[in-house]
Amino acid sequence: MSSSASHPLRIVAVHGVGYHERRATTDQVRSKQSPLWAQYLANGLQLPTDRFDLDFAYYAALLNTGPTAQGADDAEELGDRLAKQLMAVWLEELGAPKPVAQGALTLPLRYAASWVAERFSLDGRLTQLFIRLFFREVAMYLRADDDPARLAAREQVAARIAQHRPRIVIAHSLGTVVTYEALHAHPELHVELLLTLGSPLALPDAVFDRLIPRPTGPSAPLGARPPGVARWVNIADPGDPVAIPPRLARAFSGIALDLTDSIHTTFGFHHAKNYLSCAATSATLGPYLGA
């Protein structure tokens, strides 16, 4: 698995939520993010960035093609019904008290943010903004099996992998869901390592049960390593409320390592740059670099 310094490690990186830039083209975003992600990896490994040949799969624009939904710019609320449903399932998985009165779909965003912020010792305002952004984009992707935006995002990721021909695919957050589906849809794509970071793939009733292909099994449903992936490693910060339930390998077969690493002590628990530069990521990538 070693690679000489004269041959940079070919990687395709797949982003999570919060990367949509309305006034930028896909190529502009890719040109901006590719060197940043390479730098985060280089920082963790204490290597020069030229050890990486990193391409960036940008799909966020494909999930944001229509007009802004009513209430979408209101940081005090989630206007989308599916987004609120997914948020309610997530809160239940985290162990939040069930809402009294009219049910989960009436649950105010500010209540959810307040509970999560207190539970994980986070800044309440930042937590509210993150929850709103995360569940809006997750709902955009998971709305329907055959939703054009979902298919387009999946195909965009597959196209970057096919063109760049990486040894490694690194996916973060919602990007782990898009990448999982893209690699299953294209078994002809072969990668030596799939590295998932801060993944919500196992979240029951919200993400797990909506995956394509659907998880199956004789006793309990299980997802599976995509057929073209030689090795799958998952990393999650134990304080990352997005990467729940913990231990992805409980819900998916074929995961070689299911690692935990404290990547940041404050709200950076889910940031891509902290995952990319953490010790577990460096240890996972080291053998592919001859390091």
Image (spheres, grey):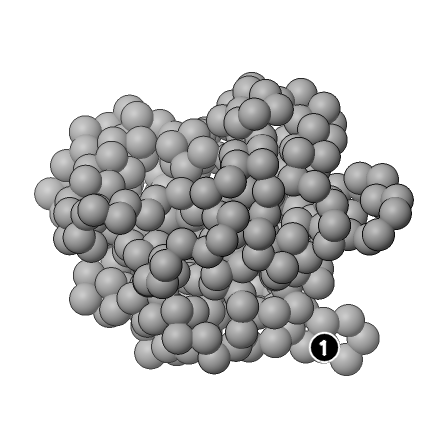
Q: Residue at x 34, y 71 (%)?
A: 152
Residue 151, given in percent of the width and then of the height, sits at: 39, 74
Residue under pointer 1 = 217
Q: Residue at x 78, y 48 (%)?
A: 92
Query: From this viewpoint, which residue is outermost toward the right?
Result: 100
- Image location (x, y in percent) of residue 83: 59, 55
Relative to 93, is 272 on the left or the right?
left
Q: Residue at x 43, y 30 (%)?
A: 274
Q: Quadrant of the C terminus?
A: top left
Residue 153 lies, in percent from the top left, at 36, 65
In the rendered image of this protein, does residue 281 appear above or below residue 117? below
Question: In this orientation, which residue lies closer to the viewer: 100 or 127?
Answer: 100
Q: Amino acid at mark 1?
A: Gly
The location of residue 62, given as percent across then percent down, is: 33, 62
In the image, taking residue 110 as reference, residue 220 lies left or right, namely right
The vertical placement of 110 against 212, above or below, is above
What's the residue at 33%, 47% (across, down)? 20
Q: Is residue 32 above or below residue 248?
A: above
- Extreme left residue here? 6
